[in-house]
Image: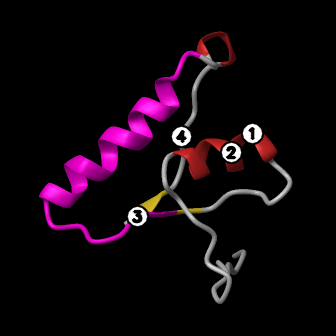
Amino acid sequence: GFVDEIYLRPAVRGRGIASEVLNALPKALASAGLRALHLEVERNDSKAVKLYTRAGFKPRQSYMLMSKKL
């Protein structure tokens, strides 16, 4: 599965809400049979990279996300 967006209003950021979601979501999806969860992050967004790394996401060196704008 792919996480397309996680958005928190600026006023509520920094309270651990995104971490809670990123920890609960995989558990719920795994119980439904999902075997992997993927997301896209900008390499230079150090806060997001740190958040996703803490949640157990790892970069995949041999893969890249590809897109075609229409």
Q: Quadrant of residue 22?
A: top left
**Residue type pointed to by label 2:** Lys
Up the image or down, 69 lies above or below 9; here it is below
Residue 47, image x, y percentages = 75, 39
The residue beneath circle 4 is 6
* 68 within the magenta span: no
- Marked residue nearer the N-terminal end (4 or 1): 4
Element carrying mark 2: helix
The residue beneath circle 2 is 50
Disc 3 + disc 1, Cβ < 8 Å: no
For image coordinates 57% across by 65% down, the residue present is 58
In screen coordinates, is 13 left or right of 17?
A: right
Disc 3 + disc 4, Cβ < 8 Å: no
Q: Residues within 10 Å of mark 4 (few under 14, many from 20)?
A: few
The residue beneath circle 3 is 37
For image coordinates 64% across by 78% down, the residue present is 65
**Residue type pointed to by label 1:** Lys
- Marked residue nearer the N-terminal end (3 or 4): 4
Give the distance between the C-alpha atoms of the residues marked 3 and 1, in whole angstroms. Answer: 20 Å
Disc 2 + disc 4, Cβ < 8 Å: no
